[in-house]
Image (spheres, rainbow, N blue to C red):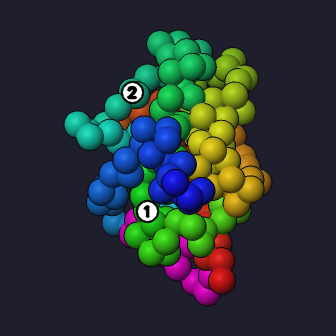
Amino acid sequence: MSDTVESRLAALGITLPEPAAPAANYVPFTVTGKLIYVSGQVPMGPNGIEHQGKLGDTYSVEQGQAAAKLCAINLLAQAKIASGDLNKVRCLKLNGFVNCTGDFGDQPKVINGASDLMVEVLGENGRHARAAVGSSALPFGVAVEVEGIFEILD
């Protein structure tokens, strides 16, 4: 099997979902020139929202990483719709938001769940700049939300 984004996803046992519709008055992504700005994605699974909890309280770093990974899967689903071909996409930046207590300081470890997946799936095109910040609350009580900026390659 050739080394494509699709083959890497298959090897990881990941099927990209149908992208979720926005939950409010915004679009799931915008494209300007060669850039794709993907709105924040929550950990939406096949049966709805998953990973509701607060890091440093009811949720562990490992559970947060799983939530961030699911957010990244949803980012890739949106980027695929926006670009038409994930083999022509480069991840430029991720912004990760972690629902956490005030004394929780492992936001970077949590967002590694998304960052690691981008590199696993996109290879060198998955290496990106990033922010990982704590938040006192996130929509629907989710543990993590991640937004991304991607480049469409020639």
Horizontal side of 109 relative to 48 (left or right) equals right
Secondary structure under badge 2? loop
Is disc 2 surrounded by few (<14), some (14 to 19) or many (20+) residues within 10 Å? many
Between 8 and 41, the residue placed more toward the observer is 8
* Left or right position of 45 against 53: left
Residue for badge 2: 52
Location of residue 36 in the rendering, given as x and y in whole percent from the top left corner: 56, 72
Residue 31 point in image, percent of width and height: 52, 79
Task: Name the residue located 38 percent from the left edge and 51 percent from the top edge.
Answer: 16
SS for dot 1: helix
For disc 1, the marked residue is 78
10 versus 62 height, above or below: below
Q: Give left or right: position of 110 versus 9.
A: right
Q: What predominant SS class does the magenta segment belong to? A: strand
Q: Which residues are magenta?
A: 27-37
User: Is residue 142 rendered magenta in the image?
Assistant: no
Q: Nearer the viewer, residue 29 or 102?
A: 29
Q: Mark 1 or mark 2, which has the lower sequence index? A: 2
The quarter of the displayed image where residue 125 is located: bottom right
Do the residues bearing badges 1 and 2 touch, measured as CB atoms within 8 Å? no
The three-letter code of the residue at mark 2 reads Gln
Specify few, some or many for label 1: CA neighbours under 10 Å numbering under 14, 14-19, or 20 or more: many
Q: Residue at x 42, y 38 (%)?
A: 13
Q: Position of residue 63 (x, y in %)?
A: 51, 21
Q: Residue at x 30, y 57 (%)?
A: 18
